[in-house]
Amino acid sequence: MSDADAPLRPPLITGDKSLSDITRDICVPMERKPTGLWWAAFLVSAAALTVGVAAVWYQLVTGIGTWGLNRTVGWGFDITNFVFWVGIGHAGTLISAVLFLFRQKWRTAVNRSAEAMTLFAVMCAGIFPLIHMGRTWLAYWTLPYPNTRGPLWVNFRSPLLWDVFAISTYLLISAVFWYVGLIPDLATVRDRSQPGLRRRVTSILSLGWDGSARTWHRYETVYMLLAGLATPLVFSVHTIVSMDFATSVIPGWHTTIFPPYFVAGAIFSGLAMVLTLMLIARRVMHLEDYVTLTHIERMSLLMLSMGCIVGFAYGTEFFMAAYSGNPYEQFVFKNRALGPLSGAYWTMVTCNVVVPQLLWFRSVRRSLPLVFMIAILVNVGMWFERFVIIVTSLHRDFLPSSWAHYIPTSIEIATFVGSFGLFFTCFLIFCRIAPAIAIAEVKGAAGLKKRPAMRRVDAQSSAVAPGTVAAETAKPAGVS
Amino acid sequence: MNQISGQPSPDRRLRRHTVPEPDSAPPADELFSVSRRRFLEAAGFAVSLAALQGCGRTPTETALPFAVQPEGVIPGRSLTYATTCPGCSAGCGLLARVRDGRPLKMEGMPEHPLSAGGLCAIGQALPLGLYDTHRLRHPLHRGEQSDWEEIDRLILQTLQQPGLSDGAVRFVTPTITSPTLKASIDRFLSRFPDGRHVMFDAVSCSAIPDAHERTHGVRVLPHFRLARADVIVAFGADFLGTWISPVEFTAAWRSRRAPAPDRPTMSWHVQLEGRMSLTGSNADRRIRLAPDEYASVLRHLHGRIRSMAVGSPPDAAAGSAPLPDRDLQELADRLWEARGRSIVLCDSQDVAVQTLVNSINHHLGNYGSTIDLERPGRQRQGNDREVLRLLDDLKQGRVSALFVAGTDFTHNLPERRSLAEAIENVRLVVSFSERLDDFSSLAHFVCPDHHPLESWADAEPVSGIISLFQPLLAPLGETRSILESLERWSGGSRSAGDIVRSFWETDVFPRSSAESFQDFWDQAVHDGFAEVEPTTETPGDFNAAAVVEVDATVSDDEYCLSLYSKVGLTDSRHAHNPWLQELPDPITKVTWDNYVCVSPAAAGRLELHDGDVVILESETGDTLELPALIQPGQHDRVLAVALAYGVRGTDRFAGVGPRWIGAEPTVSEGGVIGENAAGFIEARDGTLRYARNGIRLRKTGRRHELASTQEHHWLEVPPRVAPYGAEMREPIQSTTLAAFARDPSAGSPESHHQSDVQLWPEDHPKTGHAWGMVIDLNACTGCSACLIACQSENNVPVVGKDEVRRQREMHWIRIDRYYSGTGDEVDVGHQPMMCQHCDNAPCETVCPVLATVHSQEGLNVQAYNRCVGTRYCANNCPYKVRRFNWFEYPHEDELQNLALNPDVTVRSRGVMEKCSMCVQRIEEARIDAKRRGAPLLDGDIQTACQQSCPAQAIVFGDMNDPNSAVSSALNSPRRYGVLEEFNFRPSVSYLRMVRNREEEQHEGGEHV
């Protein structure tokens, strides 16, 4: 039984909302003029984006040498950021698809922004493999397409090629999933808006949504199918990303634990990022009634469990290194913990394993500032996890003569900052042009109080189906 | 609606077809106006034209064939000329590969009796010195460009001035092995009543000939024949690195260092030295001894050997030796056992010490066997006493004309300032320098000599072995051979070629056994050298009375400064060669700088770290400010500084390397590369001393980052992160001779065997060629000649100091140098490391675009054109031999593009590169064999690194041919593959190092 129907559980949506209240609450922030806070955030994000664009442009014109990489450490910030952003992108699909299939209704409050976040995070992620190439302008050579060069095919054995497929598939499916989920809400916006640009655009994008039972039926079917399609991606994408490392011969990379470890890490970081964003959006857009403490608590619990899986993986790595009898492997792990980059390692352990343990306490889970802090720390920790895996494995490998250090340059840092700029710029624009919470879905999760309100909404908006979720129409709605 | 749909209004459509009324002609401006449609037509055409233009590649260039084809020249094919290496006075044989009139690659001459096919880094780097825009292209008169008529007229005019020609005329050169040039100088000087030729070596061995003058009555440098020596005891002499004739000595030394299972013998090489030299790093036994302690040890050694030889009691007055008695006795015993087959070498500049060395060698019966005075060497003839007299004369104002050729006189001597002032008083100062160096900037006339590759010359490095230089290209500038300049000033007008040829006809030919001069000459030009009767004064009998008591008291000074020359930069002349500047020092691995080497103990005491700037101060008040470098294995009292730095004009290297916002220039503004340490050379008792006491060292608190290509120098991993039982890495395996004699495969760690497990079934037989390489670590000295050979052959760019500091050097072959042991007594191992061309190459599977693939012949090939630069291959390379083009690396000097090998692609920014096993040479040999209709034979292909290796440590060939040299090397019990336990199946194998020792330091073989 889903939460919303269980009478003994606290409602997911508080504030005694009617359906029209929900529509209004969610649509109003995007209909009125942006607030000063929004402008401030947007300007900061856009400035960061500009810095990033300038850094990338300089690097493309001058050379990868503007990064701190060297003959030993061939990947640094670039791939660290790539894996970091891909990881963040994971929560979106997890929340939208997996939790949808498991009928976790609390997801409705966060799924829209989580999906948007996924999309933008994957965009940010995709930039790094592109710009990390020595000859970015030839990036299309990684695509298997008929050509006149031989014909020269791509190397299907290379994990980097698998990445190309995995990431592009993921981006595509995430975008479609996000868009399909948006269709009923776009129709709501269309119906609410005055004649003008917004109405024209939303009427095209909502694909002539009429809110009929048949439309709903088909929509729900498509959504379910897409969720089914997207679910394996949650596991496949980061599995494949982990194979960039796992299939190599470098001690610290060459390990079979990576696929599950990376997936858990990705979901962990994604949840942390969703929490971070939701806590901000909740405050800024006054969505306290929709993103309630219950949501925060569930997300926290999920984060805690993922943190424990990740911590277990860290331990397993050390155990396997010790057990393997491979001195190179043993060295890499000792070197991680005690070598020149041990600071990064212990930051990772602290942020990812130690700090999340606070979430065992209900009081912590229900304290917004603490949860926010923990989420931020988890984000930091997960970035360092990728840094540790990539750089500490590379910088001291087999032959001591080639050991090297790695210090990022200002250009790399600016590029990293720029990726945050891109992410937040996109997210802020998204908040202005599309409902940040899935109106249609959240209505399904809302405990419906008053029949009249329901009717009123029906009259007002064609976007709300009689039972909201086709599969549940048979159930008596509004028990409370 | 109409507006929106964009249809033309009816009246507008009509107007196009309406003939204008005659009286309503359009206004003038409309006549010239263009309709929108016309404009779009034109614009579209222009855009498509531009697009078509843009599709084209670089503009077509027409290459016209020669109107008259030069004889024997086939465009694109290289010709090889036999000549002599001008890099130093050792006179190694050189085969210069010239293509389309451009000398591109210098190779060793296998037939040469001295160098035996080897060529050092300096010889390999010659092309870059040739194509150098900083070489003078015109003669200079008082710094202004002039022409030769003017110069000749003015110099002759000056020489005729009263009081000048009858004054002291001094002609300073470094060691001249050329009999023709020596005769020309003598002829020129003969017209002056007080003309004298002074030979000045920047790093002199003057004490050796001086000592022989005392003990044997002839002032000659003996020819040391290390190939005959079973026991070599060297005091400081870096004979494998820089001392006298390193290539020749390396070849000779190596010939006694190849133990076979059936004949497990090797020479025993002991090095007693203060700093860590290349030679010391290869010794079987290395004893740390400060240069001021040589005398004491030699005196003890002399006493013991003399007592064994003539039965006299040991030198009682010698006091206590700075060496344990057991070690001294072992040295004496083993030398005595090998008498007649041993040699004692010393680089001391104290004549008394050298006479002691002569006496030891005499008592050991080494004269006539390992030390040849009958056919002496002429490779060092510098006479410090005369140099010091000249300096004195200059300071007293007694010199009226000073000619200097081939050496930067003022740069390489102490008291530069007072010397420069003294030179100002000389009435005629002429330099023959090829560039505006420190001395030429003081000269009235600079008459630039040709580059040695542009001119005829000759050399007789060892009496009886005489070789020719032949011009390989027309001079690039308006320079003139020194032979021709002297000829003009002596009243002649012959060309350099004629001068050399006629000298050979009159003076060299009579010493040969040839029938006719023409045959002799043709053969000599073809071969590059000729063996003729030696000319020498007969040495007298050993004069025991000349052996004087040496002052054997060991100074209690805190420091002893040792000035040395670096491999690759033995002479300030080479400081302008960016390849040599970027050559990592074989021991310290530092590029682009000189520094003060201090021992770990001293550094600990002073709390010094690598790169801390210190000030050295001498008793005379000279100071030198240099970064410190901690050198394991160095004597605790010794501070070592390299000479030949701080060279005028090296500020040019400010432009080396990529320029971007994070870049730091290789040379700071107005600065030069390194600091000149010549001010610390001490003149004492008639010789220039490179070791001195009375030095104070002070920290400044500033830092200067040194650019080293290696960050971790030890086989031991840092103890803090070392896993239990795996404290040591084993890329270099070694054993002792004693263990080798018992078991030829001793020293092989148990776990390090290649697995037979293959992922793919063996249903794909590998037929045809399988290229492979074997490197004998027992032969390799780490001299780094291969590194420059590879750089020259494969167009490897120079990246500059900042890039090296960021660990982005581009060398395709590197020499890994590892220490093991404690910080005081260390063993050193050198290991050339390049792409191992693994059969199971980790790089190949990970490239997304198939830019690196396996060839049918077992090569791991890199398609630069296909590379998109993900660097995944480099990450996944366990040997870290792949090099990425982080930037575009143009030559600092565009003229240096002439040194590019047209057979090898110049790589662009953003692509990966690495050793190709000289695939262009493989193809060249294959095409050649095909043309001849013969199969490709073993030895037809020589990789660049293999060709020049003075120690012949590298063997390359077909592993599928059971009779090839590489196959037999692969069957050696000493063979192992680096990291072969991972089943990468490298095509490059190594032969385990064998040290001539009794003890085994570690269980299961000693890991050096």
Image (cartoon, rainbow, N blue to C red):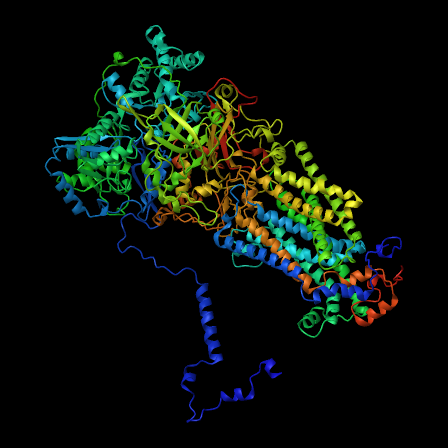
Placement of the N terminus of chain A among the 4 image quadrants: bottom right
Q: Nearer the viewer, residue B614 or B736?
A: B614
Q: Quadrant of residue B225?
A: top left
Q: Name the residue furthest left.
A: B162
Q: Nearer the viewer, residue A75 or B361?
A: A75
Q: Is residue A71 left or right of residue B405?
A: right
Q: Position of residue A172 (x, y in %)?
A: 66, 59
Q: Quadrant of residue B402?
A: top left
Placement of the C terminus of chain A among the 4 image quadrants: bottom right
Q: Nearer the viewer, residue B484 or B577?
A: B577
Residue at (69, 34) in percent of width and height: A319
Is residue A328 depicted above or below A42 in this figure? Answer: above
Q: Position of residue B244 (x, y in %)?
A: 32, 28
Would residue B341 be seen by someone viewing this image from the given angle?
no
Q: Quadrant of residue B556?
A: top left
Would residue B605 be seen by someone viewing this image from the given angle?
yes
Is residue A372 depicted above or below B678 in this figure? Answer: below
Q: Is residue A108 left or right of residue A53?
A: right
Q: Position of residue B287 (x, y in %)?
A: 43, 20
Is residue B675 depicted above or below B131 in this figure? Answer: above
